[in-house]
Amino acid sequence: GAVVSQHPSRVICKSGTSVKIECRSLDFQATTMFWYRQFPKQSLMLMATSNEGSKATYEQGVEKDKFLINHASLTLSTLTVTSAHPEDSSFYICSARGTGARYGYTFGSGTRLTVV
Amino acid sequence: TQLLEQSPQFLSIQEGENLTVYCNSSSVFSSLQWYRQEPGEGPVLLVTVVTGGEVKKLKRLTFQFGDARKDSSLHITAAQPGDTGLYLCAGVSRGSTLGRLYFGRGTQLTVWP
């Protein structure tokens, strides 16, 4: 089945630094990738949608300059949290959708970001 | 505004009981998915329903898609402690060009032995 690898699974960084999270589709080409943020015991909140080779589409209220998304190839998308602050601490999850008659969205295992 | 209203938000039951989780919307969806998520992990797809009125069964789980494709339900028969987790419904809005997946708020299910 379709597999999406996301790493790191956990990262702790100092306030003011930047953190990059990678999301790779291992056995299919992901034309579209989605980035979500999730707070404890809550649902997933879509941050942005990216299509390979084009700029990401950000949801309202999500700072483009703070959460940089790059989807340079059909198998890799990255989310960079720039100048991280403690309030950016959260669980970040990516999801990928392939081409063809695919209804499912394959999710990564998530990244727990803690900013200290 | 939540496009998909999921209820209940929390459910705490004893092993062996039955339960139903609802997902409702005023919008039509081209497909609707149900996911289960464990703490610290990504959601895992349980089922996708596409056709209005469709019913799918996965062992003790029964999923139904409303005739108008605006609502769905998940019914668990004889719940077990292993069913504990966060259940999420998510749908692709009809006509969506980006294929955005809208999530409900989730139902945190706890099954006690």
Image (cartoon, rainbow, N blue to C red):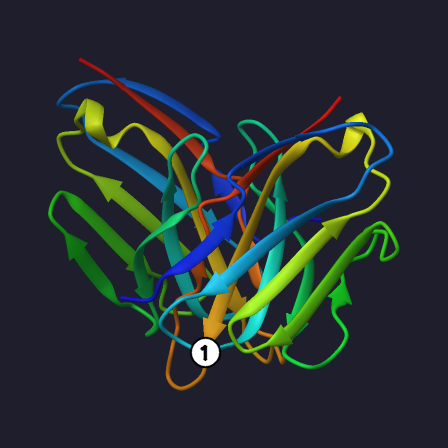
Residue B3 appears in the rendering:
no
Instruction: Report the front residue among B35 and A55.
Output: A55
Residue B18, located in which quarter of the rendered image?
A: top left
Q: Where is residue A72 in the image (x, y as percent from the top left)?
A: 66, 75
Q: Where is residue B98 in the image (x, y as percent from the top left)?
A: 63, 76
The quadrant of the image that shows the N terminus of chain A is bottom left
The quadrant of the image that shows the C terminus of chain A is top right
- Give left or right: position of A27 versus A48: left
Report which residue position mark 1 lands on.
Answer: A29
Amino acid type at circle 1 is Gln
Number of dots carrying numbers: 1
Q: Mark 1 lies on which chain?
A: A
Instruction: Report the front residue among B113 and A25.
Output: A25
Q: Where is residue A38 in the image (x, y as percent from the top left)?
A: 60, 39
Residue A46 lies, with reference to residue A39, above or below; the image says below
Residue at image location 49% in from the left, 63% down from the top: A24
Q: Where is residue A27 in the image (x, y as percent from the top left)?
A: 35, 72
- Give left or right: position of B25 versus B53: right
